[in-house]
Amino acid sequence: AAPPPPPTVPPAEPGQPARPVAGDATGWSMEERLYNQVWGMFEDLARTTAAYRSAADFAESRMDKELEQVLSDPRSRIGGQGDAVREAARARYAQLVAQAQEALDRDLAQLAAEADVVEPALPPAYARWDSPAWHAYRVPMEIPMALRLGDLHLPEADRIRIPMLVRLPLERGLWIDSGPAGSSDGSFTDSHAMSRLALETAVAHAARLLAVYPAGEFTVHVIDPAGSGAQPLAPLVQTGVLAAPPALGAAGVADVLGRLTQRVDLVQMAVRGGAADSLPPGFDTSQQLVIVNDFPHGFDDRAVNQLRYLADEGPAFGVHLMMVADREQSSGYGPLLDPLWRSLLRLTPVADDHLADPWVGHAWTYEPSLVPPGSLILQQVLSQVATARTKFS
């Protein structure tokens, strides 16, 4: 079928840029158009910021070179000639930076206007938790293209937030880093608070995954060996959307990881043997996610090896990993776990500038997609998911 026609773009006033419209990118559906439009905004902001930084760096290096020439020329010390040259160099620098800033401001204004129309048009899978799209939520019939994990922004354009969208099904596991983190004012969040924030972030991501998949097509397991995550996990437990209560202790760790490892082995053999339709009757074909809290507590060497196996092989065969962990707490394993951490997409429960774009490599500040304080939208959405799963089964 031919793609639907793009939205009608209102004519621009003479001398003004065209007014942005949500969904005016290419694509076979509005969802794909919005996905491509968000990525276009991401690339545009990366490149326009790179142009500004390059121009500012050039202006500074040019001024430094001119000032160095003045200092190295003995004649510049006579009659104030050097002062005039220095003033001229600084004036040229200010002019170049002002021109670069003017171009940046123009591009940012256009991007901000586009963000203002795109954000309200995003479907639940792409939308913030405070979006009206979630209040009109219904359990979907189809899997979306992508999922929002948070927002990205740069210091030159702090007002513009680019949705961080990742394709579904997930190609990599997620690592919610509960390690120490500093803020811009120099303060630090203590380890207990970071652990709680990290697990709350994991719960928000897991709830979104449950909500955007059709009923019965996404299953979540939780490993909480010490039982320390009872409060943050409450929305998942109380609404009944988990496959089973959170697994406790070393026995719980071994049980969940053993079953999921066997599942990956079974599906892997069936797919590679060209017999994907010969899985046992009643086999649960839904995508599986296991949330691991408080690693490495409760993990022996066998469990660690199973975890590494799931991180490497699981995503291709429908088993996904979400780690909530402080890497330093597993430092006793030495380099053994380095491949595990590298295989996971690191996210943080607080704003942190650790993600790079694929075009120019800026350090983007990532902010997780969290439920607003006091909002009940998470419980409401998960209750609908649980109801739909009951009807489905």
Image (tube, grey):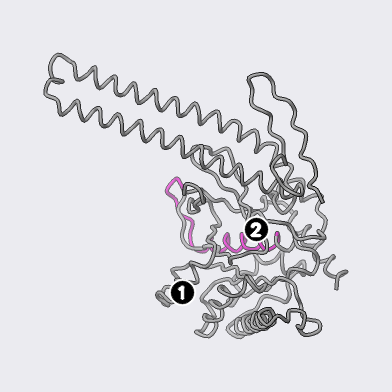
- Per the model, the C-alpha gap separating discs 2 and 1 is 26 Å
Q: Please name the residue that numbered disc 2 is placed on.
A: 167
Residue 124 placement, left or right of 342: right
Q: Quadrant of residue 319?
A: bottom right
Judging depth in this view, the residue of 90 and 183 nearest the camera is 90
Q: Which mark is residue 337?
A: 1
State which region is magenta.
Answer: 184-208
Position of residue 333 relative to residue 376, above or below, is below
Q: Quadrant of the C terminus?
A: bottom right
Residue type beneath disc 1: Leu
| Secondary structure found at label 1 | helix
| Secondary structure found at label 2 | strand
Determine the main secondary structure of the stretch shown in magenta.
Answer: helix
Question: Residue drawn 48% across and 50% down?
Answer: 353
- Looking at the picture, how far across and down is residue 323, in whole percent? 57, 68
Query: N-terminal of the two: label 2 or label 1?
Result: 2
Position of residue 214 relative to residue 353, above or below, is below
